[in-house]
Image (cartoon, coloured by chain):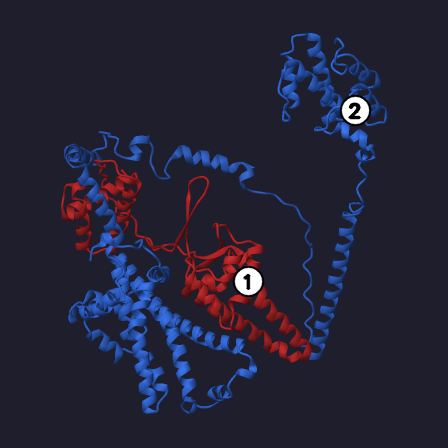
Chain colours: A blue, B red
Amino acid sequence: MELERISVVLRPRAPREALDLGAAMLRANALAVWSAWFAFTLPVFVVCNALGVLLGLPWLGLVLMWWLKPLFDRLPLYVLSRAVFDRPPSWRETLRGQRQWSWRSTLAALSWLRVDSNRALRLPMELLEGAPRKLRSARWKVLRRRIVADTSLLTYGCLQFELVLFLSAWLLGAMLIPHEWRADSLGDFFRHDVRDASTTWMLLAAAVAYLAMSAIEPLYVACGFALYLNRRTQLEAWDIDLAFRRMHTRLQALGKVLGILLVCAWSLAGHAATSAQAPSKPTAASLQQVFRQPADGADQRFATAATETYRDPRFGGEHTTRKWVFKYAPKPAPNASPIPFPAFGNALAIIFKALMWLLLIVASASLLRFAWRWRGRLTPAPVEPMSTLSPSMRVSVVADAPLPADLAAAARALWQAQHQREALALLYRGCVEQTARLLKLPPSADATEADWLRQAAAIDDPAHAQRVIAIVRTWQFAAYAGRYPDDAGIEQLLRGWPVEAGAPA
Amino acid sequence: MLDTVREIETPEGIALRLRAAGALPRAQAWMVDMLLRMGVFMLAMIPLSLFGMGGNGLAMLLLFALTWAYSVVCEVWLGGQTLGKRALGLRVVNADGTPVTWLPSVVRNLLRVVDVLPGVYGVGLVSTLIDPYARRLGDIVAGTMVIHAIELPAGQQVPTLAAVPLPVVLVADEQAALVEFAERSGQLTLQRQEELANLLTPLTGRNDSAAVRQLIGHANWLLGRP
């Protein structure tokens, strides 16, 4: 067995977690496991049932298949043990490989150990280790210690799962097949003794049981194998072994450099060992010596700081609370004579009636509270003033429409119609376009007000620049703060450049 | 490498490891819950059966609560553990490792209706066997998973020996392996300890029990002991 080639993560796991690793291993090697499984068990299933029918004992197939389970267990174990340490074998290899394993333990499992809740764990020990007889019982004692409960849980759980799948198939059939299509003999199958059941139903039951077994038995073996791996990891520290092997290769790769280092290390190690006995010669060999303070909780300075911090009221500490309490202890209620049941029932009824009333009151109160909180929220929102704008006016405000020929008149009309925001928007747009034209800038839709303020600095004529700044600022105050200039202010902005394009500033 | 761990990395670069719980432990936890609930219901039926129709009504209410509310209440208020899950050391968490909250808990428990089909949890069983994190359909829809909550089997204290500094710089994994060796050496036989220690002869330059002692010394040094 070469541990380096293992394909599962080895780490100490709780036994129950190891069971789940078994399921993961099975999932990863499902194809290899089940191809080998069906290649061997399907002929056996056919033979067993044919034998049963020929002998006139239709239940024999069902019983034989159950009885032969320990024989079938060898297949999944072979596949998984090869898959974990090497690669999954094909079904031919699996069947051929069975000859390598001894048959003695399988014979035991088929006869006096047939009812054994530890089969899943015994299987890998006997087949994979193949220890001689004398050692085996001692080995078994070591291996099963502490995980006997989990092995039994595994056996019991898998039995349950098989039953669940078996019943599920029948119940699903019962749910999906219409009533009139059901054969009458089905009722007899459940009503009468199993021995009297008709052969067809018996064979069908055997087939369903075989399918359920095929699904769960590999899981059982895989989980047992995972338990075994986990126990070996625990007993022999396989994970540490792997880590050490990796270290070994890395350190050897370091090679001669390390050789030189080792010479120094030995001297240093000797040094450290002596310094532990004679602390008068400090070397930086441990945390304590590096940081000049004890590594554990014996640090005085830290302890005082911690107590100081805990004294802070925000970190808990002592609280004083005041509350009212009865000065006189309440008198114990006089012992009532045992109430006969009708009276007790009445009391119960009254209590429940009171509870119902209480529920009603709480419900209506919360409904009222809800209505109070949401009052006025459901009235329709006030109509937007924008909608009163005439269509021609709206067009001039929208950004991608061309500006009106007489910008000042349009803005003034908007202003006088109390659409101050729109008027200023129009003014701002006009101003921006004029500025762009003046500076020969390409038209850009995503320039912000701040961009235009920056552009204004590039205008040669300071009077023009000041007007641009004034208009942009006015627009900003209006747009973001809702502060509008008075009529005189707007009139001043509308006169001269840039609204009247040719005019001086 | 096969494992049942779901690793989640937080934005801070911390890897959280969720150890997904498989079908077998979960089925046993469900079984424990089932028996508990049946016990409670039967005990409650003894007094309730004296009250005729009214008692029957109360019994129905109790049955409803035990069927639908029990799991949700336990999962939300008892840290993601019903009593059966607590007994088996399991816990329900959201798929990102956070504690399960109301909505996912309600969803995953309502969808038991689907998982229970066709009456004996057949769908749930098949789903848990197929899914890599053993989630049933309810878990997949609600975005939750069931994990192992019990602590891992730990080793003992590292035996105290004089610290020996390491001659070379080891990466974090290798340091952890050394400390782990020192912690678990008490559980190994002497021969196995020496066998393992001999693997690291390039590091220690020694063999057998001297190598074991030196490795434990290194572990002491790594732990910051004098």
**On what subunit does the disc labeled 2 rest?**
A
Frontmost residue, A206 versus A441: A441
Classify the position of the C terminus of chain A by image quarter.
top right
Residue at the extreme right = A416
Q: Residue at x 65, y 77 (%)?
A: B56
**On what subunit does the disc labeled 1 rest?**
B
Residue A494 place in picture, x, y as percent = 79, 16
Classify the position of the N terminus of chain A by image quarter.
bottom left
Frontmost residue, A255 versus B226: A255
Can see residue A328? yes
Frontmost residue, B204 versus A189: A189
Q: Is residue B8 left or right of residue A281?
A: right
Q: Which residue is under mark 1?
A: B109
Residue A467 place in picture, x, y as percent = 72, 13
Frontmost residue, A357 versus A401: A401
Q: Quadrant of residue A112?
A: bottom left
Q: Is residue A96 left or right of residue B38?
A: left
Amino acid type for the residue under numbered disc 2: Ala
Q: Residue at x 47, y 65 (%)?
A: B84
Q: Quadrant of residue A430?
A: top right
Amino acid type for the residue under numbered disc 1: Asn
Secondary structure category for the residue under label 1: helix
Secondary structure category for the residue under label 2: helix
- Residue density around tag 2, few if under 14, some if 14–19, many if 20 or more, within 10 Å: many
B103 above or below A32? above
Label drawn at residue A423: 2
In the image, which is nearer the foreground, mark 2 or mark 1? 2
B36 above or below A505? below
Can see residue A122? no
Residue B128 place in picture, x, y as percent = 44, 63
A218 above or below A229? below
Q: Find the distance from the CA under tag 2 to the CA under tag 1.
A: 62 Å
